Every structure is written in structure tokens, then in C-alpha cells.
Image: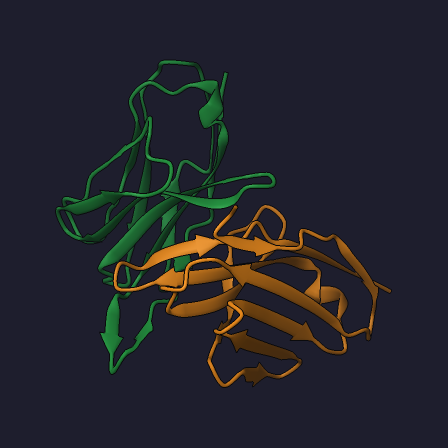
Amino acid sequence: RKEVEQDPGPFNVPEGATVAFNCTYSNSASQSFFWYRQDCRKEPKLLMSVYSSGNEDGRFTAQLNRASQYISLLIRDSKLSDSATYLCVVNRTPNNDMRFGAGTRLTVKP
Amino acid sequence: EAQVTQNPRYLITVTGKKLTVTCSQNMNHEYMSWYRQDPGLGLRQIYYSMNVEVTDKGDVPEGYKVSRKEKRNFPLILESPSPNQTSLYFCASSLSWTSGGGSYNEQFFGPGTRLTVL
């Protein structure tokens, strides 16, 4: 079983839709959680960190459930520019030992 | 501009011909890492380095070597490349600190090196 699992998608949604991605992790020692965005043939870039209390950044909301070892990302009012692959990442400090999910691909269509 | 650079960006080589992919960061980060990305497998860590002269194996270190003689540079060496090392490689760096039980360690990635071994 992979340490970080994501639904690979693809998710094809119309502009303006709300879409949610889920991620589960198996290692309870995980300390930090992130969502990264990766455009086609480009490097991953940090989208947002995920905090225990949940956090929001504009149209993006991240949630963490430590008991269930589950992370989610909600995108509201999808834009064409949101089309990308979204990577769930968990980190076991203090070694900065990051584990990446395989990614969920999103395509937003006009 | 704060960045991680990799060279070359694209490389086609033949089995057994030693090669080095360079990685350099200008952010004074302690931590650096190499990943490979393959379809359906996501990013897998090859080697990482917590600081100068400190390196350790990641998940898939076989067939690779690294060195960290200076803080800014972390080259990846393939002594005898094989076709199963054909992949997209990313170098990354981050600060490495913890505080009050929390930590911050956003990783900044280089633009990637697409390697094909024939």
C-alpha cells in the first residue's frame, strides 16, 4: 500500500464548478501536510499548507483529519487556470522526509 | 531571484555512460533533495541532504550517487545509467526548522531534467 494515496482522476469539470480532492496517508508519524500544484511538464509548486483547524485561501479550502489520516482540498468556482495536477504531500519531520501522492489531475472546461 | 536551477534540462544518453545532473540553489537552504517522477508513481525521493557533507538515501537510491560539498550545490551522479533510469528528475531545497512543535518546510523545486537512457 502506498504511503500517500490519491484518486488519480481525471476530474473534468465545467467552469464555476466546485470540486473536491481527497487524500489518505498511512503513517501516523506524519507532521506536516501540503497541497502542491503541478502544471504539465513543470515543477511542483506549493499551493497551500494544511493546518489542523482547516484553512482557506481564496477559493481553496484545505482540511485535515488526523484521526482518520485524511486530507482534502476543495476548489470553489473553478477557473480554466485551475487545470493542473494536484499533489498531496505529507512530511515526517525532523528529516523533511516528504511523501508525495501520485497526484489528481483536474481539467476545467469552458 | 530566489530559485533552484538544474542542468541540463534535457538529456539523451546511452547505457553505461556516466553523467551528472547539477542542482544549485541561491536561498541558503540547508535541505536539498532529488526526486524522480514517473507516470502513475508520483514523485519518489532518491537522496536527500540535511546540510553540507550530510547525505542520506531516500526511497529509490539504487544506481545514483550524490555529494554535498557546498551548501548551494547538490549534484546527482549516475555512474552507469540504465534504461530504467529514464525519468523526469527534480531537485528541491528548503529551510529546515522546527519551532514549538510545529515546522515549516516548503520545498522549492527546480524546473526538472528529462533524462532518456537508450
Q: Is residue A15 found left or right of B67 in the rendered image?
A: right
The image quarter containing residue A75 is bottom right
Q: Which residue corresponds to the image point at 33% horizontal and 72% vertical from the top-left?
A: B104
Examine the rendered structure and indicate whether residue B21 appears above or below residue A69: above
The total number of labels drawn is 0
Q: Which residue corresponds to the image point at 66% horizontal and 58% vertical from the top-left?
A: A84
Examine the rendered structure and indicate whether residue B99 appears above or below residue A35: below
Q: Is residue B51 found left or right of B115 in the rendered image?
A: left
Q: Which residue corresponds to the image point at 32% horizontal and 43% vertical from the top-left?
A: B58
For the C terminus of chain A, which image quadrant? Answer: bottom right
Image coords of residue B74 (percent x, y): 26, 44
Chain B in the picture: what colour? green
Image coords of residue B86 (percent x, y): 49, 27
Between A24 and B31, the residue placed more toward the observer is A24
Image coords of residue A21 (percent x, y): 66, 65
Examine the rendered structure and indicate whether residue B101 appears above or below residue A41: below
Looking at the picture, the colour scheme in use is by chain
Q: Is residue A13 found left or right of B20 in the rendered image?
A: right
Image coords of residue B12 (percent x, y): 48, 23
Q: Which residue corresponds to the image point at 42% horizontal and 59% vertical from the top-left?
A: A27
- Residue most toward the front? A67
Q: Is residue A37 found left or right of B14 in the rendered image?
A: right
Chain ID for orange? A
Examine the rendered structure and indicate whether residue A76 appears above or below residue B37: below
